[in-house]
Amino acid sequence: MRQLDTAHARKSDPQTSKDAAASVVNLGRLRNHILKLYRLAGWQTDEQLIVNYRKIYGAASLASDSGIRSRRSELVKMGLVEKAGIGKTASGRACQIWKLK
């Protein structure tokens, strides 16, 4: 299993992706922030998680939307977060709802 505190790029990714992955730090801290948001809000979609993250930690945070989703996915793999049902995005599309396990 790959190390969860290090960002990775695929072998087939361009050098810019590899450089970006090498520059990422503090994935553990971001996961801890996300766990805190689940404790505060209960269940939420990825879209809601991102909105809540920006409200609490600021829009200028170094975490990208995709980085937040990736950290949530890692928390699922770690057995700390699980599916809680199906919800809707702001645009009305179906999406997964997540909660603490």
Image (tube, helix red, strand yellow):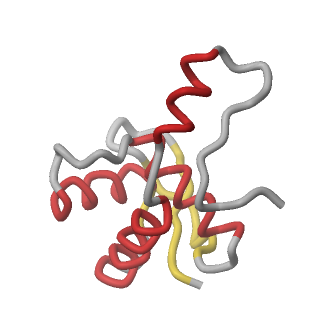
Locate the C terminus and report the quarter of the image it occupies.
bottom right
Q: In this rendering, would 77 be left or right of 45?
A: right
Q: In this rendering, would 43 be left or right of 15?
A: left
Q: In this rendering, would 4 be left or right of 91?
A: right
Q: What residue is at 55 percent from the left and 38 percent from the top?
A: 22
The image quadrant of residue 43 is bottom left
Q: What residue is at 40 percent from the left and 76 percent from the top?
A: 38
**Residue at the extreme right:** 1
Q: What residue is at 62 percent from the left and 16 percent from the top?
A: 15
- Residue 31: where, in percent of width, then height? 47, 67
Q: Is residue 76 above or below residue 93?
A: below
The image quadrant of residue 73 is bottom right
**Residue at the extreme top:** 14
Q: Nearer the viewer, residue 86 or 49?
A: 49
- Residue 55: where, in percent of width, then height? 16, 58
Q: Nearer the viewer, residue 9 or 96?
A: 9
Locate the N terminus and report the quarter of the image it occupies.
bottom right
